[in-house]
Image (cartoon, grey):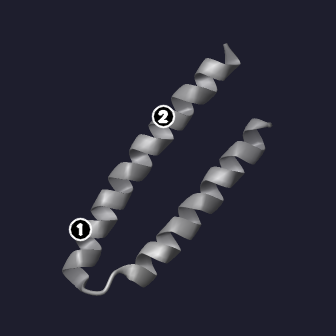
Amino acid sequence: MSTTSFFRGVGVGMVAGAAVGAMVMSSRSAMKTGVGRAMKRMGNAMDAAWYDVQHAMR
């Protein structure tokens, strides 16, 4: 698997997750909380993915 296809897949997953999250959220305050949690989870996932890519390239 090339790094380009990996990052393309991560990007598509982020867009799909955001779309599903936007459809599921009902109230504005719930959306703010949900978006904050989703951004934190996405940041953690990207950090973990970057660490894995760095480790694989060694």
In the rendering, at what x and y percent does residue 48 appear? 48, 34
Q: Closer to the N terminus: mark 2 or mark 1? A: 1
Quadrant the C terminus occupies: top right
Left or right placement of residue 26 versus residue 16 in this view: left
Residue that carries the numbered disc 2 in the rendered image:
48
Left or right placement of residue 36 versus residue 47 in this view: left
4 over 13 or under it: above or below? above
How crowded is the residue under tag 2: few (<14 C-alpha within 10 Å), some, or many (20+)? few
Q: Mark 2 belongs to which amino acid? A: Ala
Q: Mark 1 belongs to which amino acid? A: Thr
Outermost residue on the top side: it is 58
Left or right placement of residue 45 versus residue 10 in this view: left
Residue at 38%, 50% (x, y): give it.
41
Give the label on residue 33, or none. 1
Q: CA distance from mark 2 to mark 1?
A: 23 Å
Residue at 30%, 86% (x, y): give it.
26
Looking at the rendered structure, the secondary structure element under dot 1 is helix
Looking at the rendered structure, the secondary structure element under dot 2 is helix
Outermost residue on the front side: it is 24
In the rendering, at what x and y percent does residue 52 appear? 57, 28
Left or right placement of residue 17 versus residue 10 in this view: left
Outermost residue on the left side: it is 29
Quadrant the N terminus occupies: top right
Q: How many marks?
A: 2
Residue at 69%, 19% (x, y): give it.
57
